[in-house]
Image (tube, rainbow, N blue to C red):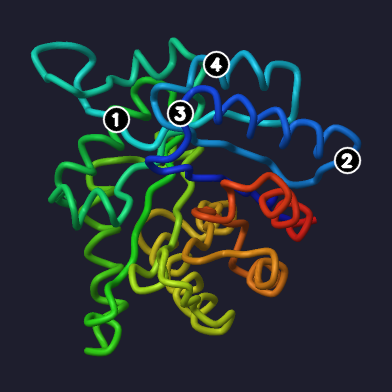
Amino acid sequence: MRKKIVAGNWKMNNDLNSSVALISEIKNLLASKSLNAEVIICPPFTSLDAANSLIKDTQIKLGAQNMYYEKSGAFTGEISPLMLKSVGCQYVILGHSERRTIFGESNQLINKKIKAAVENQLNPIFCIGETLEERESGVTFKIIETQMREGLEGLTAEELANLIIAYEPVWAIGTGKTATPEQAEEVHAFIRKLIGELYSTEFAEKLIIQYGGSVKPENAAELMSQPDIDGALVGGACLKADSFVKIIESAQ
Protein backbone atom coordinates (compact mmCIF):
# COMPACT_ATOMS: atom_id res chain seq x y z
CA MET A 1 0.00 0.00 0.00
CA ARG A 2 1.32 3.44 -0.94
CA LYS A 3 2.09 5.86 1.88
CA LYS A 4 0.39 9.24 2.06
CA ILE A 5 2.57 12.35 1.73
CA VAL A 6 1.34 15.79 2.75
CA ALA A 7 3.47 18.74 1.67
CA GLY A 8 2.96 22.41 2.53
CA ASN A 9 3.87 24.97 -0.13
CA TRP A 10 4.25 28.27 1.70
CA LYS A 11 4.73 30.24 -1.55
CA MET A 12 5.92 33.84 -1.00
CA ASN A 13 4.76 33.99 2.61
CA ASN A 14 6.47 34.28 6.02
CA ASP A 15 9.68 36.11 6.82
CA LEU A 16 12.28 34.41 9.00
CA ASN A 17 10.62 35.20 12.32
CA SER A 18 7.14 34.10 11.24
CA SER A 19 8.64 30.96 9.66
CA VAL A 20 10.26 30.00 12.94
CA ALA A 21 6.98 30.60 14.79
CA LEU A 22 4.94 28.50 12.34
CA ILE A 23 7.39 25.59 12.32
CA SER A 24 7.57 25.62 16.12
CA GLU A 25 3.78 25.45 16.33
CA ILE A 26 3.56 22.61 13.78
CA LYS A 27 6.24 20.70 15.70
CA ASN A 28 4.39 21.10 18.98
CA LEU A 29 1.10 19.91 17.49
CA LEU A 30 2.72 16.89 15.85
CA ALA A 31 4.97 15.94 18.77
CA SER A 32 2.41 13.72 20.51
CA LYS A 33 1.07 12.12 17.34
CA SER A 34 2.11 8.86 15.72
CA LEU A 35 1.98 9.54 12.01
CA ASN A 36 1.57 7.17 9.10
CA ALA A 37 1.79 10.04 6.63
CA GLU A 38 5.05 11.69 5.61
CA VAL A 39 5.15 15.46 6.17
CA ILE A 40 7.09 17.97 4.06
CA ILE A 41 7.29 21.74 4.52
CA CYS A 42 8.44 24.05 1.72
CA PRO A 43 9.23 27.50 3.15
CA PRO A 44 10.73 30.35 1.11
CA PHE A 45 14.47 30.21 0.40
CA THR A 46 15.25 32.72 3.17
CA SER A 47 13.86 30.37 5.83
CA LEU A 48 15.26 27.02 4.65
CA ASP A 49 18.37 26.99 6.85
CA ALA A 50 16.45 27.90 9.99
CA ALA A 51 13.75 25.37 9.10
CA ASN A 52 16.33 22.64 8.72
CA SER A 53 17.63 23.29 12.24
CA LEU A 54 14.13 23.38 13.72
CA ILE A 55 12.93 20.10 12.21
CA LYS A 56 16.03 18.11 13.11
CA ASP A 57 15.06 14.86 14.89
CA THR A 58 11.38 15.27 13.95
CA GLN A 59 9.13 13.52 11.43
CA ILE A 60 9.10 16.61 9.21
CA LYS A 61 11.09 16.73 5.94
CA LEU A 62 12.29 19.84 4.13
CA GLY A 63 11.59 20.92 0.56
CA ALA A 64 12.15 24.00 -1.59
CA GLN A 65 9.65 25.68 -3.90
CA ASN A 66 11.84 25.88 -7.00
CA MET A 67 15.42 25.73 -8.27
CA TYR A 68 17.53 26.28 -11.38
CA TYR A 69 19.07 23.38 -13.28
CA GLU A 70 22.72 24.53 -13.22
CA LYS A 71 25.01 23.82 -10.27
CA SER A 72 26.56 27.32 -10.27
CA GLY A 73 27.30 30.24 -12.55
CA ALA A 74 26.17 33.66 -13.71
CA PHE A 75 22.45 33.17 -13.08
CA THR A 76 21.53 36.17 -10.96
CA GLY A 77 18.76 35.48 -8.49
CA GLU A 78 18.66 31.72 -9.04
CA ILE A 79 19.22 28.88 -6.54
CA SER A 80 21.05 25.68 -7.46
CA PRO A 81 20.40 22.07 -6.43
CA LEU A 82 23.65 22.06 -4.45
CA MET A 83 22.56 25.14 -2.51
CA LEU A 84 19.31 23.41 -1.58
CA LYS A 85 21.13 20.28 -0.46
CA SER A 86 23.52 22.36 1.66
CA VAL A 87 20.60 23.60 3.79
CA GLY A 88 19.05 20.16 4.22
CA CYS A 89 16.44 19.98 1.46
CA GLN A 90 15.35 16.53 0.38
CA TYR A 91 12.51 17.66 -1.91
CA VAL A 92 11.91 20.39 -4.45
CA ILE A 93 8.66 21.53 -6.09
CA LEU A 94 9.06 21.84 -9.86
CA GLY A 95 6.60 22.94 -12.54
CA HIS A 96 4.09 24.60 -10.24
CA SER A 97 1.38 26.34 -12.24
CA GLU A 98 2.46 29.72 -10.87
CA ARG A 99 5.95 29.10 -12.29
CA ARG A 100 4.38 28.11 -15.61
CA THR A 101 1.83 30.93 -15.91
CA ILE A 102 3.51 33.89 -14.17
CA PHE A 103 7.14 33.15 -15.00
CA GLY A 104 6.67 31.42 -18.34
CA GLU A 105 8.35 28.12 -17.51
CA SER A 106 8.02 25.61 -20.36
CA ASN A 107 7.78 21.83 -20.16
CA GLN A 108 11.31 21.71 -21.57
CA LEU A 109 12.71 23.94 -18.82
CA ILE A 110 10.90 21.92 -16.17
CA ASN A 111 12.37 18.75 -17.70
CA LYS A 112 15.88 20.18 -17.27
CA LYS A 113 15.09 20.99 -13.65
CA ILE A 114 13.77 17.50 -12.93
CA LYS A 115 16.91 15.99 -14.46
CA ALA A 116 19.09 18.28 -12.32
CA ALA A 117 17.12 17.37 -9.19
CA VAL A 118 17.54 13.62 -9.64
CA GLU A 119 21.21 14.01 -10.60
CA ASN A 120 21.75 15.79 -7.28
CA GLN A 121 19.65 13.40 -5.14
CA LEU A 122 16.75 15.80 -4.63
CA ASN A 123 13.27 14.29 -4.85
CA PRO A 124 11.10 16.23 -7.32
CA ILE A 125 7.49 17.11 -6.61
CA PHE A 126 6.44 17.51 -10.24
CA CYS A 127 3.31 19.65 -10.64
CA ILE A 128 0.90 19.29 -13.55
CA GLY A 129 -2.59 20.56 -14.20
CA GLU A 130 -5.02 22.22 -16.58
CA THR A 131 -6.56 25.69 -16.62
CA LEU A 132 -10.30 26.31 -16.38
CA GLU A 133 -10.44 27.10 -20.09
CA GLU A 134 -8.69 23.82 -20.91
CA ARG A 135 -11.04 21.83 -18.68
CA GLU A 136 -14.11 23.47 -20.17
CA SER A 137 -12.72 22.78 -23.67
CA GLY A 138 -12.45 19.07 -22.85
CA VAL A 139 -8.66 18.87 -23.29
CA THR A 140 -7.68 18.10 -19.67
CA PHE A 141 -6.18 14.68 -20.46
CA LYS A 142 -4.34 16.01 -23.52
CA ILE A 143 -2.75 18.80 -21.44
CA ILE A 144 -1.81 16.41 -18.63
CA GLU A 145 -0.28 13.92 -21.07
CA THR A 146 1.78 16.60 -22.82
CA GLN A 147 3.06 18.00 -19.52
CA MET A 148 4.04 14.52 -18.36
CA ARG A 149 5.63 13.29 -21.57
CA GLU A 150 7.67 16.46 -22.07
CA GLY A 151 8.45 16.98 -18.39
CA LEU A 152 9.74 13.42 -17.89
CA GLU A 153 11.40 12.98 -21.29
CA GLY A 154 14.73 11.16 -21.14
CA LEU A 155 14.32 10.02 -17.53
CA THR A 156 14.29 6.37 -16.52
CA ALA A 157 12.17 4.66 -13.87
CA GLU A 158 15.33 4.15 -11.82
CA GLU A 159 16.09 7.87 -11.90
CA LEU A 160 12.51 8.66 -10.93
CA ALA A 161 12.32 6.17 -8.05
CA ASN A 162 11.55 9.02 -5.60
CA LEU A 163 9.39 11.11 -7.91
CA ILE A 164 6.15 12.60 -6.60
CA ILE A 165 3.58 13.91 -9.06
CA ALA A 166 1.20 16.60 -7.83
CA TYR A 167 -1.99 17.06 -9.84
CA GLU A 168 -3.10 20.64 -9.35
CA PRO A 169 -5.95 21.89 -11.51
CA VAL A 170 -4.99 25.52 -12.06
CA TRP A 171 -8.63 26.61 -11.71
CA ALA A 172 -8.64 25.28 -8.12
CA ILE A 173 -5.43 26.90 -6.85
CA GLY A 174 -6.11 29.74 -4.45
CA THR A 175 -9.64 30.17 -5.80
CA GLY A 176 -11.54 28.34 -3.10
CA LYS A 177 -12.79 25.96 -5.78
CA THR A 178 -11.80 22.34 -5.39
CA ALA A 179 -12.09 19.49 -7.84
CA THR A 180 -14.66 17.03 -6.55
CA PRO A 181 -13.14 13.79 -5.26
CA GLU A 182 -14.50 12.10 -8.39
CA GLN A 183 -12.96 14.71 -10.73
CA ALA A 184 -9.62 14.47 -8.96
CA GLU A 185 -9.64 10.66 -8.89
CA GLU A 186 -10.42 10.52 -12.62
CA VAL A 187 -7.29 12.52 -13.45
CA HIS A 188 -5.14 10.69 -10.89
CA ALA A 189 -6.17 7.35 -12.40
CA PHE A 190 -5.29 8.69 -15.87
CA ILE A 191 -1.86 9.81 -14.61
CA ARG A 192 -1.16 6.39 -13.09
CA LYS A 193 -2.27 4.64 -16.29
CA LEU A 194 -0.04 6.88 -18.41
CA ILE A 195 2.95 6.28 -16.12
CA GLY A 196 2.31 2.56 -16.57
CA GLU A 197 2.50 3.02 -20.34
CA LEU A 198 5.62 5.22 -20.18
CA TYR A 199 7.45 3.00 -17.68
CA SER A 200 5.74 -0.06 -16.20
CA THR A 201 2.63 -1.04 -14.28
CA GLU A 202 4.80 -1.94 -11.29
CA PHE A 203 6.39 1.51 -11.27
CA ALA A 204 3.00 3.19 -11.68
CA GLU A 205 1.54 1.30 -8.73
CA LYS A 206 4.33 2.58 -6.47
CA LEU A 207 4.17 6.19 -7.67
CA ILE A 208 2.94 8.81 -5.19
CA ILE A 209 0.40 11.16 -6.79
CA GLN A 210 -0.72 14.07 -4.61
CA TYR A 211 -3.71 16.32 -5.14
CA GLY A 212 -3.34 20.09 -4.80
CA GLY A 213 -5.87 22.86 -5.22
CA SER A 214 -7.64 24.50 -2.27
CA VAL A 215 -7.11 21.50 0.00
CA LYS A 216 -8.60 22.25 3.40
CA PRO A 217 -9.32 20.31 6.61
CA GLU A 218 -12.96 20.10 5.48
CA ASN A 219 -12.24 18.27 2.20
CA ALA A 220 -8.87 16.58 2.79
CA ALA A 221 -10.12 13.24 4.11
CA GLU A 222 -12.61 12.71 1.29
CA LEU A 223 -10.01 13.60 -1.35
CA MET A 224 -7.31 11.38 0.13
CA SER A 225 -9.70 8.45 0.52
CA GLN A 226 -9.79 8.06 -3.27
CA PRO A 227 -7.81 5.02 -4.48
CA ASP A 228 -5.29 6.94 -6.59
CA ILE A 229 -4.82 10.04 -4.40
CA ASP A 230 -1.76 9.56 -2.21
CA GLY A 231 -1.68 12.79 -0.24
CA ALA A 232 -1.87 16.52 -0.76
CA LEU A 233 0.19 19.50 -1.82
CA VAL A 234 -1.32 22.18 0.40
CA GLY A 235 -1.23 25.91 -0.26
CA GLY A 236 -3.00 28.48 1.90
CA ALA A 237 -4.15 26.00 4.53
CA CYS A 238 -0.55 25.11 5.40
CA LEU A 239 0.13 28.65 6.65
CA LYS A 240 -1.84 27.96 9.84
CA ALA A 241 -0.44 25.18 12.00
CA ASP A 242 -3.79 23.84 13.19
CA SER A 243 -5.30 23.52 9.70
CA PHE A 244 -2.12 21.95 8.28
CA VAL A 245 -2.00 19.39 11.08
CA LYS A 246 -5.70 18.55 10.60
CA ILE A 247 -4.97 17.82 6.93
CA ILE A 248 -2.04 15.61 7.96
CA GLU A 249 -4.34 13.76 10.36
CA SER A 250 -6.84 13.27 7.53
CA ALA A 251 -4.19 11.27 5.68
CA GLN A 252 -4.01 8.62 8.41
Kind of residue at badge 1: Met
Left or right: residue 102 versus residue 93 is: left
Q: Residue at x 80, y 56 (%)?
A: 252
Residue labelled with disc 3: 15
Q: CA distance from mark 4 to mark 1?
A: 18 Å
Distance from Cα at disc 3 to Cα at disc 1:
19 Å
Q: Secondary structure at mark 2?
A: loop
Q: Which residue is mark 2?
A: 33
Above or below: residue 140 compared with residue 101: below
Judged by depth in the image, the label closer to the viewer, 2 or 3, is 3
Residue type at mark 2 is: Lys
Query: Is 91 displayed left or right of 130 in the figure?
Result: right
The Cα–Cα distance between marks 2 and 1, rounded to whole angstroms, is: 32 Å
Q: Earlier in the sequence, mark 2 or mark 3?
A: 3
Dot 1: element: loop
Of marks 4 and 3, the one in the foreground: 3
**Amino acid of disc 3:** Asp
